[in-house]
Amino acid sequence: MRLFEQRPFLGGRATSYVLPDGEHVDNCQHVTLGCCTNLEDFYRRVGAQDKIKYFDRLLFQDPQGRTGTMQAGLLPAPLHMTGSFLTFAPLSQADKRSIASALLQILRGKGHTEDLDTPGGISMLEWLQKRKQTPGAIERFWRVVLVSALDEELDKTDARFGVDVFWKGFLSNRTGYRMGVPAVPLSELYDGCKQEIERRGGEVSLRMPVRAIHFQDGGVTSVEFDGGRQEFAEAYVFAMPHEALADLLPDDIKVKEPGLAHLENIKTSPITGVHFWFDREVMKEPFVTLLDTTTQWIFNKTALYSGKNGSREKKEQYQYLQLVISASYDLLQKPRQEIIDLCLAEVRQALPAAREAVLVKATVIKEAAATFSPQPGVDRWRPRQQTSVSRMFLAGDWTDTGWPATMEGAVRSGYLAAEAVLRAAGTPKKILQPDLPPDGLVGMFV
Ligand SMILES: Cc1cc2nc3c(=O)[nH]c(=O)nc-3n(C[C@H](O)[C@H](O)[C@H](O)COP(=O)(O)OP(=O)(O)OC[C@H]3O[C@@H](n4cnc5c(N)ncnc54)[C@H](O)[C@@H]3O)c2cc1C
């Protein structure tokens, strides 16, 4: 097995790099959830499981300083969040009543409601409006969770993905919502990948962009690199982003394999990360979600790394925060300084200690095509990992996994591609991990 990666490092979109001053920065904060069973399996396979810290308390705060948490109490699923929900100060009683009735519908349908089967899909906003959700519930609950989880606005999100987040993450079991946050810069999660491939006799080649794919008689015959070098294999798994693959495909192959003909229908959405270094500690919590602000999450990287960062020796002198803004369409055209000023004002509003602190440095990383956009009906355009083109297999979060664009979706696609390759070779094997089983009262009835 040989892996060819165009960049000088592994990790793709979920990676980190070192700034000229020696600071390690993720291209953006990445988190996982307890329901991401395949990603957890992948971290275990490459020896990275101890590099993820899990948290069972999610903290929310509005500009008035009112807070709420999501944390499992003593009751079994689906009632485990009842205590948190009842005391969630940023939501009114009317908001809570409307949310509870919509959650009940998801629960009754075991993660499904009939209108999700509408041809072409329906948007999450439409789904919520049909269930008479209050503006407060939409803005301060559904939008907050789903824009972060799915990187898209509610009117452009297929409700199927939104309902799935609540079913798998919050309703069907007690642990699906637990948030896993890397305790190291992202690139350190993949140290074990190269070793694991090499241990099995494989090879990893970096700085090796595929420049062309050659086809003959309805099958892939080779891939070409710079200088005309060609490589030949019994099976080829193309795991690049869908736009990059589309550029390499000749028209006749797109006609032959309908799954490859519509890749341009899969749109992308942006995420912006803002990195702040303060001259003192301004935050004690590991992370907080902000309501009603441009900034959606603040991650306390200093606390999360706990001395594991490359800038360990400077740790005592300052605090490093990373802010995340998903579906950040409005920020794409804004100058970086304007984004820094906007977010700094929000951080100082949310964290009183930051008002006195000096911002030592700041950087903004805009990922214009961070994820594929989970638009209504998008699943129609996502090809399966096995194609009708001989020896051609696909992987990537954008392929047909049933999941949105996440690390979990990417790992699932890789496992499904591996299963397809093994099937084609006549040595079938199950690699995909099952979902978390429903537990508590849900487990008794589902
Ligand atoms: C800012 C941001 C924040 C995110 N936050 C989260 C999060 O919190 N949680 C979460 O689960 N997911 C998150 N995601 C999504 C997650 O990063 C992706 O879903 C996942 O990394 C996709 O993996 P992939 O293997 O499908 O694609 P990629 O990671 O894009 O990998 C494709 C690889 O192909 C390589 N490549 C491209 N063209 C060629 C070529 N011609 N030849 C050789 N190699 C090539 C690329 O260099 C890249 O390494 C985030 C993404 C971004 C950008």
Image (spheres, rainbow, N blue to C red):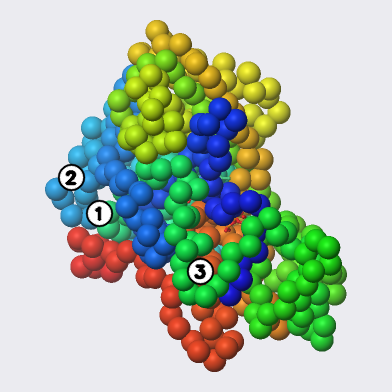
Characterize the local packing of mark 1: few (<14), some (14-19) or many (20 or more) Cα atoms within 10 angstroms.
many
Residue 418 vs residue 242: left or right?
Answer: left
Q: How far from the left and from the top, in percent, is residue 116?
A: 51, 60
Residue 177 vs residue 127: left or right?
Answer: left
Query: Where 4 falls versus 286 (above or below)?
Result: below
The front one of 374 and 35 is 35
How many circles with numbers are drawn on the protein?
A: 3
Element at label 3: helix
Which residue corresponds to the image point at 39% horizontal and 31% vertical from the top-left? 312
In the drawing, what numbered circle is on residue 330?
none
Residue labelled 1 has its Cβ within 8 Å of some atom of ligand 1: no
What's the amino acid at mark 1? Arg
Query: Where 118 falls versus 149 (above or below)?
Result: below
Disc 1 to disc 2, C-alpha distance? 9 Å
The front one of 238 and 201 is 201
Which residue corresponds to the image point at 30% horizontal and 47% vertical from the top-left? 54
Q: Name the residue under label 2.
A: 73
Q: Name the residue under label 1.
A: 174
Element at label 2: loop
Residue 358 vs residue 257: left or right?
Answer: left
| Quarter of the figure with the C terminus | bottom left
Q: How far from the left and from the top, in percent, is residue 363?
A: 57, 26
Q: Name the residue under label 3.
A: 197
What's the amino acid at mark 2? Gly
